[in-house]
Structure formats: C-alpha cells, structure tokens
Amino acid sequence: MTLISGKRGSTRSLVVPVLLAFLVMATSVAALDYAALIASHGTIKYPSAYSTFTITGVSGVYTGRNNNNPSQTTSGSNAATVITTVFGWMSPGQGVGFIGEFTLTSGITVSKDITLDFTEGSTSGLIGDQATVIGNTGTGVFLTISGAVTFLGGNFIGVTRPGIAINGASNSLFKGCFFQKIRTEVSGTYSTNIRWEYCTWHNTTAAYSYYIVFNYLGDHFYWDHCTFKDGIGSGGIGLFCNDDKGTANYAEITDCIFDNLGYHSIYLESNQEAIGNPQTDGHCIVAGNTFINMQGTNLAGVHLKVPSCLIYNNVFENWSATGYQYGYGVSAYGDYPNSNCYDNEIYNNTFKNIPLAIAIGSGPSEAPQLRNKVYNNTFINIPSINDGGAICLNLGSVSTQTNDTWIYFNRFYNCSLPFPPTDGSYSLVTNTVIAYNTFDATVPSSEQTALHSYVNTLIYGNTPWMADYPIPLPSPLPVPPPP
C-alpha cells in the first residue's frame, strides 16, 4: 500500500514495511555530522553593492559620508548620532555600507526602506570580514526596525542582553547575521513578511526566554538555514501572544539547527480567550530542522498550541534530560479555552535518544485536541524513564478531550514504551486509530490494555506484536487518511 502526496512541495511515499526491512533500516541509521551542519551556516558571501553611503567606526570615532556628495559628511564619538544622521540623508531603496566596529550606548530606529550592508569590511569582525555592532544599552532596545529593511551580514553583540525591536515592519530581510546575547522582540504595530536566512543566534543565560519572541499580531515570518545555539536556560523562537493580541500566522521554520538550548526550541501559541473568539490562526510549517543536545527542565523541540500546522522531516536527537517533564520532542495541546490544537500533522520525523517523543494533550489543557495525525515517523531508543515513551495521549493532569487522533505507518525500534498510558481519565481519549505501525518487539500488555480503555479505540494492521482491537474488528475498517 502506497500513499503519495505533493503537499507544500513535498513528496512522501509511505510503504508498509516488513519487519526485516525495518530492522535493516533501524540499525543502520547514519550519524549526523552536526559540526559540519553548524559550520555550514552563516558562511555565505555578499557583493558590496550598497556603497552610496558609508559609515566607518575605528577606535571609537565614527564617520558617515555620502560617496556621491562630499558635502554630506559627519563625524563624532557617538555612533548612534552619526548613524541616525546618515539615515536622514538616505532615500528609500538606497544602501549604506558599515565598516569597522560600532558601540551603541543609545537606541537607533530604522524606519526607511533601505539596505544595511555589514559585509564591506571590519576591524574586528567575528564572522569573516564583517562589521560589528555592540549594543551597550543595558537591557533596553538598541535597534528598532519599522520599515522594509534589509540587513546583509554583520555581528550584533550584546553586553548585557539588549534587544532588537521589530515594530510595524514589513518585507524585511536579515541574511547572514550573527547575534550574540541579543533578544529580538516583535511587538506593537502589526508586522508581516519578515525573513531570516543563514543567521546565527548564540549564547544567552536568561531563563525561560527566547532569542526571538513575538507578543503581538503578525503573519508570514520565515527562518531558513538558521542556527540557535548554546542558550543556557533559554529557547529559540517564541511565537505567542499576550491577552487578545493574537499570534504569528503562517510562519515557516525550515532547515534550521537548534543545539544545546535549555527551553522550548520553537513555541507556537495563540490566546484568544480575552476576546472570546475561536482561534483561526496557525498554519505554520516546521520542516527539515535538527534539534540536538537539549538540556534543562520544561522544554520541547516544538511546543504546539495552534491548529493546521505541518511538522515534518525533522530530527530530534541526543537530549540529556530524562523523563517527560524535562523534554518533549513535540508537545501539542490547547492551553486556553479558545486555542484549540487541531488538524495538525506530524510526519516523516526521526526521534532518537530523547525522553518523550510526542505528547498530544498535556496538562494543563483547557481546550480539546482534535483530528491530529502522527504518521511515517521513526522512533529509536526512546526510554521509559519517569513515564517517558514514544507517543502519549493526554499526559499529565488533563481535563479536556483528545479526539480523533490517527497514529499510522510509524516505526518503533528499541522503544520500551511505544504508547505510555495517560495520567488522566481514559474516558477523555476518544476515537483513536492505531494502524499499520511496525514494532521490533512486543508492545507491553499493560500498554495495550490501557489503549483498550480509551473510548472507541481501533487497533489493526500493526506488525508484529500488537494485537488487533476490538475483536471482532468492525467492517469495513476505516482507511488511514491521505497524508
């Protein structure tokens, strides 16, 4: 039986494997060269094509000039003053090249549709021969973006974790930038179509925070080939809202690396409780990413609290945390009464050596989890420590329904608990279908009995070592939905 789909440009062929083929595949999974993956990010080169204006910073002296108009020249010891003056000379569509090192002790705003090129040279750049901007504004904002701004390259270094604010921006691009001890916040006025490509975020110690955080309405945000690394106590991308402000819609996070973070790598949430509207946003894509070396307490690779998302072709591997309360690969549940987690698809992912791979319905849920699908994933070496396991429905103190979940065409290798039992009421899990999955060992009888205790569960076609349920099976059996 073959299922094929061309959704979002992907091609997925799902074949029901025989056990022998599965064992060959599972025992020969090649190790990923994470060092090579990380080294491949942030190394692209750009042409120096934006030299109408130039700003230099050498030994604390900053000079700005219009290369086509000698009368427009400014110089001084305050970087923000010089930069702001040059921005005032510029017209939309023009560019400025930064050369050297710039220390900002006060904030600046970029509100025009201009290009900032930091690749033209540096006296002390961290990435190649690129300019460096040091934010020395305490924990305040040192750079506000409210136009269609393009950033090419550059090292942005925070002294005490200052911030970059995106407020009312649209059609902005960050390409090949390096951020260290920097927090970016999207808030205030609606922002749309912001893209980060080949950027790196590194080193922060702020607990339960993120390198990039969204607090207000926005849509169409993109991260491609970015790296989020060494966030001790911190996470990567937090797309969530406060009160009635909504959340980011139609975000795409592709081919990124999340390495050694201590909180959620990707957090997708909406809260429409304050205005009483049902949630209609979401529609996010998380594809082709690598989540490795996670540590700490209370973290997930993808923390999913929105509907209609696609989570596919990701790798979750080698997390040092133990037990489900310390690390989920994917956690999906509705956190607010009007923020249902429904119609999500989790497929073609690999979960290896992590505490708990997937949890659908997890305390404290306040809205039902509906029509979520988990298929064609591979689970390898998932332990049973502290109630960990491969796929769990209604984990923790859940008091809402988890309905119409399909789990099919997955592969389990060396997983002592493929389906750890719920900690909540079995009656809250209804209409679950578990079909055509492959196991390398008998599913523990305690797990099978627990699954039978859910309401209207159908188990069939799994090979081998997982019995059909109920007996006799209904006829005709439902066919798994197409991917």
Image (cartoon, rainbow, N blue to C red):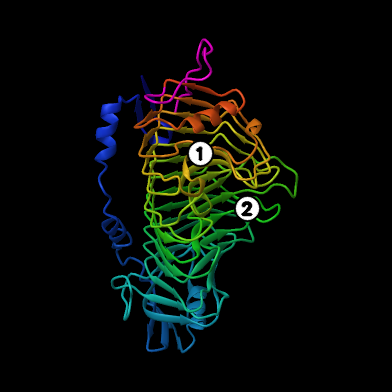
Q: Amino acid at mark 1?
A: Pro
* 480 drawn magenta: yes
* Distance from Cα at disc 2 to Cα at disc 1: 37 Å
Residue 38 % position (x, y): 31, 59
The structure residue drawn at horizontal position 47% and vertical position 55%, both measured from the top left corner, is 265
> Residue 364 lies in magenta, yes or no?
no
- The image shows residue 147, relative to residue 124, as above or below, that is above
Percent position of residue 216, x then y: 63, 56
Q: Which of the two residues, 354 or 246, is positioned nearer the viewer here?
A: 354
Q: In this view of the protein, which residue sits in the foreground, 425 or 60?
A: 425
Please give the label number shown on residue 95: none
Q: Which residue is mark 1?
A: 420
Q: Which residue is mark 2?
A: 217
> Where is the N terminus found, in terms of image quarters?
top left
Look at the image and tell me whether residue 145 can be seen: no
Give the farthest residue toward the front.
445
Please name the amino acid that badge 2 sits on: Leu
Magenta segment range? Answer: 462-483
Q: Nearer the viewer, residue 27 or 482?
A: 27
The quarter in which the C terminus is drawn is: top left
**On screen, residue 296 above or below 483:** below
Dominant SS type (magenta): loop
